[in-house]
Amino acid sequence: MAVDFPPRRLTVVVLTATRRRPERAPLLERAVRAAAAQRVSSATALEVLVLDDGPDAAGWPYVRAAVCGVDRARLCGADSAVAEGHVAVRYVAVPPDATGRVCLRLKRNLALELCSLSGTDAILFCDDDDWRSADAAQAQLDALARTGADACSVQVRCVCELSASRGCASYFEMPAAGGGGVFSAELGNPGTALLLRKTWAPGSDDPPGFPDTPYEARRLACASLAVVAEDRRL
């Protein structure tokens, strides 16, 4: 499936786990705000999809607070739309699987399914401890248009290591910058991948039992063209 540039719709998927790790909720608010504030081409509709780990919707208040901090962001239901020029922000509380868990694999596969149903042309994954500068997503889209690649990852910079006793992960920034190269673990973080629809549509989802960590690397292995990594360190 060919994707014209600029893509008609870009979905930024924010993955979080507020049920098991409520201390991450403040980071979620920052991540959603940064996602909704992305500056992309006027020809590309931007939406944000937040996938939380449980039916109790623990992250909802923080998503709502994040939306209030971005003028053009609007909270939406699963099937509702927003006016042109606004950013739709959707929140989904994901029920656990048969084992009682909501692993990253489950949330990522659900994100791919939802994006396929909505007709999204490009999908950008990020975690709840990620922050992107406002031009970061467009820089990745520009890299794909420039190289003809199916996917683009970025380097990350660890800003601060939060206290391990609080159960928090590291906090990462992805500032916009230039440069590029062949994808590798040294050049880019696969968890920051921006994928075109043709990259994920033909591939099968991971079956249960696979570890979460190398998930994105396996997805990117399905890409038909080269994968580039943008050097985004300041």
Image: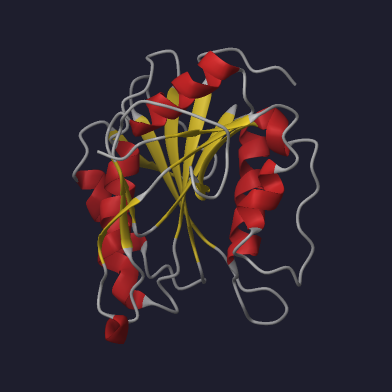
State the image quarter where residue 115 is shown. top right
| Rendered-image quadrant of the N terminus | top right
Q: Could you tell me which residue is drawn at 45 percent across and 28 percent down?
A: 140
State the image quarter where residue 43 is shown. top left
State the image quarter where residue 211 is shown. bottom right
| Rendered-image quadrant of the C terminus | top left
Q: Is residue 27 visible?
A: yes
47 to 216, vertically: above or below: above
The residue closer to the viewer here, 218 or 130, is 218
x and y percentages locating residue 114 in the rendered image: 63, 44
51 to 189, vertically: above or below: below
Q: Is residue 5 left or right of residue 20?
A: right
The residue closer to the viewer here, 55 or 142, is 142
- Total marks drawn? 0
x and y percentages locating residue 23 in the rendered image: 30, 75
131 to 46, vertically: above or below: below
x and y percentages locating residue 33 in the rendered image: 27, 46
Q: Is residue 7 visible?
A: no
Q: Could you tell me which residue is drawn at 26 percent across and 53 percent down?
A: 30
Q: Could you tell me which residue is drawn at 45 percent across and 69 percent down?
A: 17
x and y percentages locating residue 176 in the rendered image: 30, 32
Q: Could you tell me which residue is drawn at 64 percent across and 50 percent down?
A: 217
- Model colouring: secondary structure
